[in-house]
Amino acid sequence: MKKSVVNDDVFYTIAWSRLIAYEKHSASRILPEMPGILCLLETAPRGGMRYLIFYGCWRDGLRMALKNFLDPDFTKFPDINASLRGRNMQYKYTVVDSSMQDMQDVMFWLIRTYEPEFNALEGFDDSKRYKNISIREMDLGVDQVIERLPKTGL
């Protein structure tokens, strides 16, 4: 993730991994044990993707975040887990290792922009450090490494 502050405004650039079909065993090998944001999606009935949830994980890391939702023996969110069971899901992730407040700002923007099924802005706010939050999202390809943004990031 890259960040630029101009006056009272912040500009973030985040790089999403490629979309990956969810499979319990391969996910634990693919996701890094780094702080970041996990995004679960499913194919919408009329095509395109429907956002299910954004989940920020600072201490546990991305690998554990997926377990928190989708492993029925481990989940911290049994109601969401039950609702997600049987869906044809895909996921993507982005590493956010600058600060918890940056993650909060990015999560707030993502939830406000995409309105995922299992997130609500009610009770969730930005860090209040900036007047405006802007985010540029990049989708990285199969051979690109998410932990490094291309030089054209911001």
Image: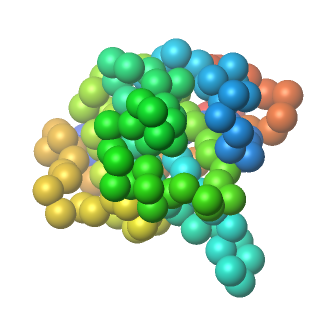
Name the quadrant containing residue 6.
top left
Name the quadrant containing residue 11.
top left
Up-down relation of residue 135 to residue 150 (above or below):
below
In the image, residue 14 lies at what x, y percent? 54, 38
Up-down relation of residue 137 to residue 143 (above or below):
below
The image quadrant where one finds the C terminus is: top right
Evaluate whether residue 101 shows in this view: yes
How many labels were placed on the picture?
0
Residue most extreme to the right:
143
In the image, residue 54 lies at what x, y percent? 43, 49
Q: Residue at x 49, y 17 (%)?
A: 34
Q: Residue at x 63, y 23 (%)?
A: 28
Give the camera-side residue of 101 and 122. Answer: 122
Indicate the colouring scheme.
rainbow
Q: Residue at x 39, y 37 (%)?
A: 75
Residue most extreme to the bottom:
46
The answer to whether 57 appears left or right of 29 in the picture is left
Give the camera-side residue of 102 and 46. Answer: 46
The answer to whether 59 appears left or right of 23 in the picture is left
In the image, residue 29 lies at what x, y percent? 69, 20
Evaluate whether residue 131 shows in this view: no
In the image, residue 36 lies at what x, y percent? 46, 29
Q: Residue at x 51, y 57 (%)?
A: 84
The answer to whether 22 appears left or right of 135 in the picture is right
Name the quadrant containing residue 98.
top left
The answer to whether 65 appears left or right of 28 in the picture is left
